[in-house]
Image: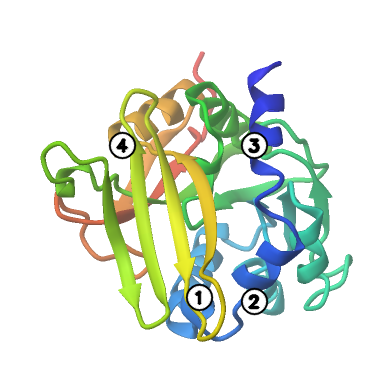
Amino acid sequence: MADTERTRTEAAPVWDAEMARSYDTPGEGMFAPEKVDPAVARLTELAEGGAVLEFAVGTGRIAVPLAEGGVPVTGIELSEAMVERLRTKADKDTVPVVIGDMATTRVVGDFSLVYLVYNTVSNLLTQAEQVECFRNAARHLGPGGRFVVELGVPSLRRLPPGQDGLVFAHRDGYVGLDTFDLKHQHLVSHHISFTKGREPRVIRVKQRYIWPAELDLMAHIAGFELESRHADWQGSEFTGDSGSHVSVYRLPEHESE
């Protein structure tokens, strides 16, 4: 089985209708205005009036407000259940979506910006697929086009000696736990929800984590140059202690001779 086919097989059952409902929390969590608004503002600025393409558009957390702000947005999404949820917010004319894999699917159109947010590049479980994601972004852009990636920094420094897991979040009714497979550079995020009178509900999401330097090399392979890197959408300085980053890659204005 090819790497792409294997990844689809492993990823597809996770993003079903139940997951789409759980993921989509309008006004709360990652859908809260303080999370969404800075991303939308920065992406609008980077688009410079052109059309944009979102890889793994999901339920439209970012694409819908971008479109409402006048930015033409198209999406690629593997999960039909996530797109069905998006359709409760925006129709096909407002946010067109092509069903497919973000590493290989092509979309007709001219785009000034391709972006993916909230760690979605890590849903591709091999390095080869992640490189193909960068190449696919480049195929959708002309000279000077940008590719924006929002991604967490692997938290391996927090692992206690001899341990392969750590808690990344906890609150009443919820615990988030990451377990690491260092040999294959994989992690599994375990989202455990507790509701009174019911059995705990567990959602597991497998990812391949990427260091910033490795991400830069993937970009270089695809012909991009790093234009900027910040710790968040507001433009905070990225440091060795930052837990995530927003990296902006750009194709050269003129192809090299």
Residue 12 x/y as whole percent: 71, 44
* Residue placed under numbered mark 1 in the picture: 36
Q: Quadrant of residue 231?
A: bottom left
Nearest the viewer among 58 and 165 is 165
Q: Residue flagged by tag 3: what amino acid is it?
A: Glu
Instruction: Give the CA distance from mark 3 to mark 1.
Output: 29 Å
What SS does tag 2 mark?
A: helix
Q: Residue flagged by tag 2: what amino acid is it?
A: Pro
Q: Which of marks 1 and 4 is in front?
A: 4
Q: Which residue is drawn at 48% across and 41% down?
A: 207
Residue 65: give its label: 2
Q: Residue flagged by tag 1: what amino acid is it?
A: Val
Point out the tag, 1 or 2, that comes first from the N-terminus: 1
Point out the tag, 4 or 2, that comes first from the N-terminus: 2
- Side (left or right) of 140 relative to 252: right
Q: Residue flagged by tag 4: what amino acid is it?
A: Trp
Instruction: Give the CA distance from mark 1 to mark 2.
Output: 8 Å
Instruction: Give the CA distance from mark 4 to mark 2.
Output: 30 Å
Residue 10: give its label: 3
* Residue placed under numbered mark 4 in the picture: 211
Q: Nearer the viewer, mark 3 or mark 1?
A: 3
